[in-house]
Amino acid sequence: MGRFLWLSEQTLSKGEQPPQDGRVTRQIRISDTAPQPDRTFHSLAFPERRDPPGGDLKAYRTARKDGTRAFTLWADQYRQQVFAHVVTKSATKGGPATYEVVGAAGEPLALITRDPAMKGGRVRTRWTVQQAGAPTAVGLKGRPFWWFVWWLISPIQLAIAIGSIIGGGDIARTPRRTRWRIDRRVVLDFQSGAGSAFELEVLEDWWDDRVTAALVALLGSHDSWLGNAWDVAGE
């Protein structure tokens, strides 16, 4: 059995206000148990967007359109210790983007590359994870069958999205499941978890938790246009 990581938002009761003590409220949780009610978990990291130097959310949004991402993953809610950083090494609007995961002391941990769909002959988005000292893992977003179904009904997707918004239900999404393989062996599996959340199952012990947590944060920031990316949500 592997480890399971997922991005979680703070749950507030009706009328309850977010805490005003400066804590980071989003967290990446980890569990040794497959998705099920009341399973045991603990908080692995607390992701926070980093705006450009001297900039603000508007500047971040502008850079974000070109594929840029910048996060700090804190080891605690009050930013006393860094777990890892995610920085953009290169990014092209509508094209590939490469992100570097570094440790608290700036040591390189991994390179994560996102190659968007419909580029270079690819039908599906490709995510490549190259952890330091480990083989490169490659994952393709969505299963071919579900992409076929998606494109088959694409003429009515806009109506589905509008109906979901008006009706207050969930918005239809593009296929999201992604399996990373090394020599045909699945080593990571991003799949539907508890409720509507997606979880990353880590199937090999050699993965660095800082790298897999960074991958979860990046996947959540590249949610589809029908989704709600965490790094700009509620802003």
Image (cartoon, rainbow, N blue to C red):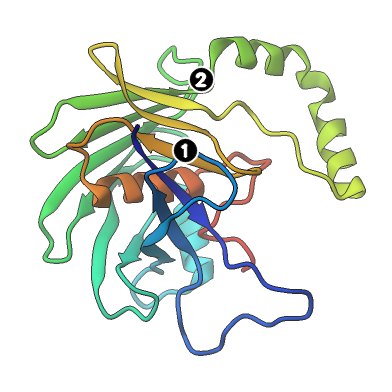
Q: Is residue 179 above or below residue 223?
A: above
Mark 2 Cα shell of 10 Å, populated few (<14), some (14-19), many (≥20): few
Q: Residue at x 68, y 33 (%)?
A: 173
Tags 2 and 1 touching, CB below 8 Å: no
Q: Quadrant of the N terminus?
A: top left
232 sits to left or right of 71: right
CA distance for labels 2 and 1? 33 Å
Q: Measured from the top left, where is residue 126 in percent x and y?
A: 40, 25
Camera-side residue of 179 and 100 = 179
User: Mark number for residue 118?
Assistant: 2
Q: Which residue is mark 1?
A: 34
Q: Measured from the top left, where is residue 38 in percent x and y?
A: 56, 53
Q: Nearer the viewer, mark 2 or mark 1?
A: 1
Q: Is residue 140 above or below residue 224?
A: above
Q: Quadrant of residue 44?
A: bottom left
Q: Quadrant of residue 70?
A: bottom left
Q: How many numbered discs sit on the rendered protein? A: 2
153 sits to left or right of 202: right
Camera-side residue of 37 and 218 = 37
SS assignment at label 2 = loop
Task: Look at label 1 and name its amino acid.
Answer: Ala
Q: Is residue 140 above or below residue 159?
A: above
Camera-side residue of 162 and 211 = 211
Q: Residue at x 57, y 84 (%)?
A: 19
Task: Look at label 2 and name its amino acid.
Answer: Met
Q: Residue at x 23, y 12 (%)?
A: 183
